[in-house]
Image (spheres, helix red, strand yellow):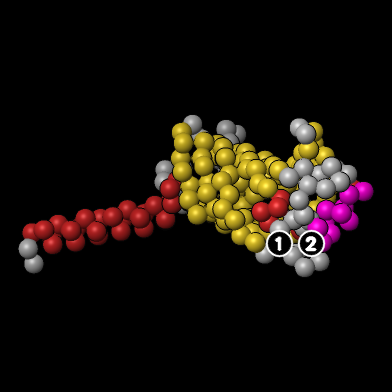
């Protein structure tokens, strides 16, 4: 074995050890029950309706010292949705929008955490809604809670087009753009 091959082997072993240590230091987190996971549909700058998913399965593997190794996943129960305008429930859960009878969940799976500085992250991932998967970027703040080390405060937002997920284009005053929001806290599992 020549010196170059030996050095490559040592560097590879060192890199693998660092990756294992980073994964060992990562903690497992879940959103608290009080965390808001929902959306806001607007038209002409005015909020038409807000929705909150009351049943959310969530997980995040995260280490503040190695955020590039983080991952997060959400499963949202469509039928658990509560709306600011309950009279729109049948319309929103109906075939033209969520089509909850056929598609009972929506999911998000992260692909990459990018640290932007000052507790600010860009989380790239895949959102699946109505059986259609599209890339989404969550503009996210993850800040250690100052009073409880078992919590991380979270604020995350993204904007998607409803029609990208097979939902009927703007009708009945319901706008095309939907703002997705996560606001609350992650807690250690």
Circle 2 — which element?
loop
Asked whether 174 or 101 is in front, the reply is 174
Q: Residue at x 13, y 62 (%)?
A: 5
Does 29 sit left or right of 79 as displayed? left
Asked whether 28 or 158 is in front, the reply is 158
Asked whether 83 or 28 is in front, the reply is 83
Residue 60, can we see it? no
Q: Residue at x 52, y 36 (%)?
A: 120
Residue at the spot of label 1: 130
Q: Is residue 108 above or below residue 180?
A: below
Q: Which residues are magenta?
A: 87-96
Q: How many marks?
A: 2
Q: Is residue 69 above or below residue 114?
A: below
Q: Could you tell which of marks 2 and 1 lies nearer the N-terminus? A: 2
Residue 22, can we see it? yes
Quarter of the picture holding the C terminus: bottom right
Q: Residue at x 18, y 58 (%)?
A: 8
Residue 89 is a magenta residue: yes
Q: Residue at x 42, y 56 (%)?
A: 24
Residue 97 is a magenta residue: no
> In which quadrant of the rendered view does residue 127 lie?
bottom right
Q: Position of residue 150 (x, y in %)?
A: 57, 44
Quarter of the picture holding the N terminus: bottom left
> In which quadrant of the rendered view does residue 139 lie?
top right
Q: CA distance from mark 2 to mark 1?
A: 7 Å
Q: Position of residue 177 (x, y in %)?
A: 71, 43
Q: Are marks 2 and 1 in contact (CB under 8 Å)?
A: yes
Mark 2 crowdedness (10 Å alpha carbons): few <14, some 14-19, many ≥20: some
Residue at the spot of label 2: 99
Mark 1 crowdedness (10 Å alpha carbons): few <14, some 14-19, many ≥20: some
Q: Is the stretch drawn in magenta largely helix, strand or loop?
A: helix
Q: Position of residue 20 (x, y in %)?
A: 36, 58
């Amino acid at each position: 074995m020549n010196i170059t091959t030996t050095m490559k082997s040592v560097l590879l072993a060192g890199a693998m050890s660092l990756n294992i240590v980073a994964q060992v230091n990562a903690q497992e987190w879940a959103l608290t029950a009080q965390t808001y996971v929902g959306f806001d549909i607007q038209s002409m700058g005015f909020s038409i309706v807000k929705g909150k998913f009351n049943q959310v399965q969530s997980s995040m593997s995260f280490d503040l010292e190695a955020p590039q190794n983080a991952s997060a996943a959400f499963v949202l129960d469509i039928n658990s949705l509560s709306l600011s305008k309950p009279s729109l429930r049948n319309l929103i859960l109906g075939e033209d929008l969520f089509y909850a009878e056929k598609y009972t969940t929506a999911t998000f799976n992260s692909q990459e955490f990018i640290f932007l500085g000052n507790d600010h992250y860009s989380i790239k991932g895949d959102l699946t809604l109505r059986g259609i998967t599209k890339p989404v970027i969550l503009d996210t703040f993850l800040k250690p809670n100052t009073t409880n080390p078992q919590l991380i405060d979270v604020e995350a937002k993204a904007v998607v087009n409803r029609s990208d997920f097979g939902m009927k284009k703007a009708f009945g005053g319901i706008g095309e753009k939907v703002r997705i929001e996560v606001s609350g806290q992650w807690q250690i599992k």
